[in-house]
Image: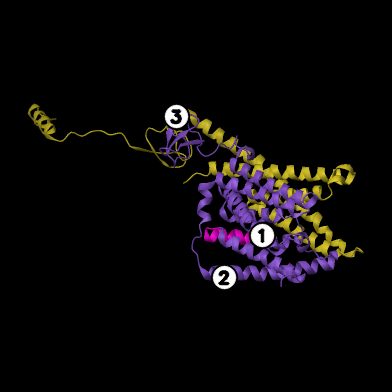
Chain colours: A purple, B yellow
Amino acid sequence: MIAPDSTNDIYYCEACHHEVKGYHRFCYNCGEYLGSDSTRISLFNHSSLQSAFSFFIVYLFVCLAVQFTNWFDSYDRLFWVEIFLASFTLFHVFKNYKAILPILKFHNFSVMRLAGCILIATIASVIINIIVIRLNFSFFRTDTSYYTRFSIYAMPAAVMIYSIALNPAIFEELAFRGVLYHYLDTFLNERLVVVVTGFAFAMMHLSFISLFWLVPFGIFVGAMRKRFGTIWYGVIFHFTFNLIAVLFDLYRHGHLW
Amino acid sequence: MFSEKNILLLQRINALLPHVERRKPSALLCRHCSYVNEMEFSFCTNCGYPLHNKLLEDVFYKRIHQRTNIRFKAESSVMFARTVLYVIGSFLFMGIFFIFAENNRKYLIVSLALMLSGLFFFLAFWSRKNPFTALLTAFIVLIAFSAINIFSSFIQSFTTLAGVTGMLLCLVLLFVMLKGVQAAYRINLINEELQFKI
């Protein structure tokens, strides 16, 4: 075990309190392993993993409450759920401000890359929306519409864009590709973090059929976060993807024009 | 033999030569991993092997033996979790027989069952290469599926026999997966400790 003295970059062996160098694996004085005590450490006292689990569990249970209870059937109540999840995410962002700050900057901005991102999101969203509508009609004989829930408001299209496209794009990306990614990145290989956050993102949507496209979606956005070192390409991809779904819905119900 | 005169001469010559200082060796090679350590060190900073006191060698080997035993136990937990994943995958694969059912949604059920079966087989295979990540992903997948199962028919989960049995099964699966994740994590740490830089 090792206890760093952050002020002078000096490390101490926790067993005998002798000063050791950062590259020492074992204490030269008592022979104690300086990494982590594998006989005592457990999953339950690993702070990053604990934070990752608690973060995911809170998200999951809020989504379960929204999906499987009728408490949040109207957007009046759902709005406060969105505010709660956004505040919860921001709280974790501030808790890990130093680690998350670099990915909030728009590095390596390229118009071509941005256009590619929007184009892929548009094509993927159109294909998936057509498949989902056909599946819903063929198997469930239903035609789900987002519009009915928002039609009572003054500007339903604007509220839909905010609630379905803008809010999830910013806060889900911040939550999964920002906070959760950071927590897992402290003890996992980054390529594996992309996969795990992709699965966590897909699971949070609580739909078996949607796993077909949500897992690749999550992994693709995570891969962009890894490659470009920023969440903004993911946010734009997510926003475009959801925006196309909203426009599709408005168009099908004759409210686009 | 030197004469007395020659001895005196040699002494005078020696007195004129620069003084040679005997120095202690500044580094010491570890007998276990050949890592270069400073002379003052009691233990090798790479593998923890005692550098001076041979009596402590026994303690070193006991520690390695203890870690190997812990790893062996952890590996059996990981293997158990992996087997459970194979069982879930095989069970879901049997959903293919729904194709003979007289149900409007039979093709959807079959494709869902096959997709989920594939997912669990993939996670089981992946756990051979990357046990911690694969089992962590399996745990996330199972916790979400269990939550969907319990919450989608919340009252039935607590009031019917099928609901309670399903809930208990979910809890058992989650427990096995969590034990597997914990064990895989421990294996990673022990491997890290026992992996000497040679």
Residue wearing tag 2: A115
Mark 3: few, some, or many residues within 10 Å (few <14, many ≥20)?
few
Residue wearing tag 1: A162
**Secondary structure under badge 3?**
loop
Q: Is residue A55 above or below residue A171?
A: above
Left or right of A142: which side holds B49?
left
- Chain letter behind tag 3: B
Residue B53 - label? 3
Q: In the image, residue A152 lies at what x, y percent?
A: 77, 60
What's the CA distance linking mark 3 and mark 2?
Answer: 67 Å
Instruction: Give the amino acid at mark 1.
Output: Tyr
Range shown magenta: A215-230
Between A34 and A134, which is closer to the camera in this rendering?
A134
Identity of the residue drawn at 53% across and 71% down: A112
Q: In the image, residue A34 lies at what x, y percent?
A: 50, 37
Residue B12 image-quadrant placement: top left
Instruction: Give the amino acid at mark 3.
Output: Asn
Identity of the residue drawn at 52% across and 49% down: A99
**Secondary structure under badge 2?**
helix
Q: Specify the quadrant that holds the C terminus of chain A.
A: bottom right
Between B102 and B41, which is closer to the camera in this rendering?
B102
Q: Is residue B169 above or below residue A145?
A: above
Which circle, 3 or 2, is nearer the viewer?
2
**Secondary structure under badge 1?**
helix
What's the CA distance linking mark 1 and mark 3?
Answer: 70 Å
Instruction: Give the amino acid at mark 2.
Output: Ala
Residue extending furthest toward the top: B4
- Chain letter behind tag 2: A
Q: Are marks 3 and 2 on the same chain?
A: no
Q: Is residue A39 magenta?
A: no
